[in-house]
Image: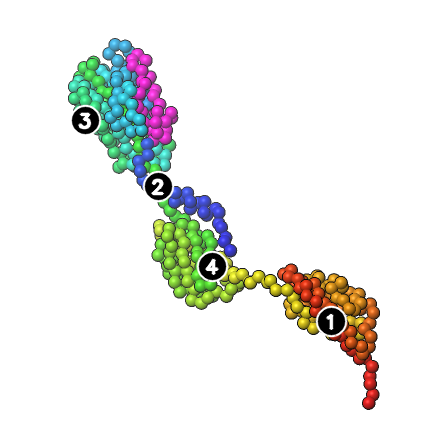
């Protein structure tokens, strides 16, 4: 009755898995315990997000980055106190921050390496604090090979020694979307002294999960009669108004109405004529479209049946008649089929029974006698303890008079 197409259900389930197009945190750096120069690391892995411990910042001259000096005196790379500005964690922590310093680093860049596979509309946000002599310009580039870097934005920095949040939207840069490997590079410029610096903290890279394009048409999963005039059809996914066109269904009785139910993935059909109980019908659907406009390419069918339960038999059988076929054979008829108890010779008394055999319809028993009935002599036979095929036993004793005259009398 219910033909489940497991493979198609599985495919459609993945296609329509919930996607609210929210920004997903791909990778983030908070620098909470970053060491100061000369121990500041030049390779820093993300500590938060989907790519925590895999997305990486490079400041060591590899992956297109510059080799930053982290000496004790006038370093270009060090660590200063951080901030909770732009810290999106449940429990923000100011901790430390990444500090880029010294006008000798003008034109130097650091590189963020990550994956944007299955993600689009890439955005970045970070907190910064710039001194009056610190870097004034942050230029952003991207590369897919680590050699060729293409500029995508240039940002002016507010140099007032206060913390600010910078949000940069790369949603219009399709070239950086859905890549297994992406390099984002920021080049700093226009610092004017060795002490001038920018602190960077709580750096986030986010993206929206790409929703696969639906190209798979709906399939009929099951059909089931819910009354003698209605059936419910289930589809593999939500369907559009074509599912309410009665001409898209076929059954010998005809369809008078079709109404989509809550969720739009099932339809209630009403027939023009009632289903005959306990009779199987073929119900077919065709031309149905999903919400993306993909139409069923062929007619798909399932069998339905309105099954009604017969009343339970609780009434025992009754013998209707008994008669002699000849003096050595008696037949006994019942009002319904009887079980094997009717072939137990002990249930027939008053005569000498050798065998008892039911007929093909189980409602008549033939008795063969070990001793013939005396001719032209009324003989009483008793029948009891016979059960029907439902197991109802009749313990009453029924009495029948047998008589046959085989002598031809002449006037």
Residue receiving disc 4:
225
Residue pictured at 48% horizontal, 49% vertical: 5
Residue 33 image offset from top left, x and y in percent: 32, 18
Mark closer to the chain start, 3 or 4: 3
Q: Crowdedness of circle 4 by 10 Å Cα count: few (<14), some, many (20+)?
A: many
Residue 110 image offset from top left, x and y in percent: 29, 22
Q: Quadrant of the C terminus?
A: bottom right
Q: Crowdedness of circle 2 by 10 Å Cα count: few (<14), some, many (20+)?
A: few
> Is residue 41 one of those drawn in magenta?
yes
Chief SS of the magenta region: loop
- Front residue of 52/143: it is 52
- 3D distance between C-alphas at marks 1 and 4: 47 Å
Q: Is residue 156 above or below residue 314?
A: above
Q: Badges 3 and 4: C-beta atoms under 8 Å apart?
A: no
Between circles 1 and 2, the one closer to the viewer is 1
Residue 345 image offset from top left, x and y in percent: 76, 64
Q: Magenta stretch: give its range.
A: 26-54
Residue receiving disc 3:
156
Residue 289 - label: none
Between circles 3 and 1, the one closer to the viewer is 1
- 3D distance between C-alphas at marks 2 and 4: 34 Å
Residue receiving disc 1:
331
Q: Quadrant of residue 232?
A: bottom left
Left or right, 123 with reference to 161:
right
Q: Badges 1 and 2: C-beta atoms under 8 Å apart?
A: no
């Amino acid at each position: 009755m219910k033909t489940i197409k497991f493979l198609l259900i599985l495919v459609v389930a993945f296609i329509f898995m919930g996607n609210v197009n929210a920004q997903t945190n791909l990778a983030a750096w908070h620098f909470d315990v970053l060491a100061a120069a000369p121990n500041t690391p030049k390779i820093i892995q993300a500590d938060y997000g989907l790519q925590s411990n895999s997305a990486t910042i490079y400041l060591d001259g590899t992956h297109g980055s510059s080799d930053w000096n982290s000496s004790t005196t006038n370093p270009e790379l060090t660590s200063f106190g951080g901030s909770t500005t732009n810290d999106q964690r449940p429990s923000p922590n100011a901790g430390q921050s990444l500090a880029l310093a010294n006008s000798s680093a003008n034109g130097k860049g650091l590189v963020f390496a990550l994956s944007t596979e299955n993600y689009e509309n890439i955005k970045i946000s970070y907190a910064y604090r710039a001194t009056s002599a610190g870097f004034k310009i942050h230029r952003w580039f991207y590369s897919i090979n680590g050699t060729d870097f293409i500029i995508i934005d240039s940002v002016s920095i507010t140099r007032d020694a206060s913390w600010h949040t910078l949000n940069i939207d790369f949603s219009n840069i399709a070239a950086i979307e859905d890549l297994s490997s992406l390099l984002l590079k920021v080049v700093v410029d226009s610092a004017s002294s060795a002490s001038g610096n920018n602190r960077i903290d709580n750096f986030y890279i986010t993206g929206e999960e790409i929703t696969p394009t639906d190209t798979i048409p709906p399939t009929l999963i099951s059909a089931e009669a819910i009354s003698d005039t209605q059936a419910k059809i289930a589809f593999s996914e939500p369907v559009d108004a074509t599912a309410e066109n009665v001409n898209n269904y076929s059954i010998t009785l005809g369809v008078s109405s079709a109404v989509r139910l809550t969720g739009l993935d099932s339809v209630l059909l009403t027939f023009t004529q009632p289903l005959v109980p306990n009779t199987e019908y073929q119900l077919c659907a065709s031309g149905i479209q999903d919400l993306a406009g993909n139409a069923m390419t062929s007619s798909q069918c399932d069998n339905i049946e309105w099954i009604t339960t017969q009343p339970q038999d609780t009434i025992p059988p009754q013998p209707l008649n008994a008669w002699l076929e000849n003096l050595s054979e008696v037949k006994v008829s019942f009002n319904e089929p009887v079980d094997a108890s009717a072939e137990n010779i002990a249930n027939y008394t008053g005569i000498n029974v050798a065998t008892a055999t039911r007929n093909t319809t189980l409602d008549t028993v033939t008795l063969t006698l070990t001793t013939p009935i005396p001719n032209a002599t009324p003989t009483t036979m008793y029948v009891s303890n016979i059960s029907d095929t439902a197991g109802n036993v009749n313990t009453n004793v029924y009495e029948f008079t047998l008589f046959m005259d085989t002598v031809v009398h002449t006037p």
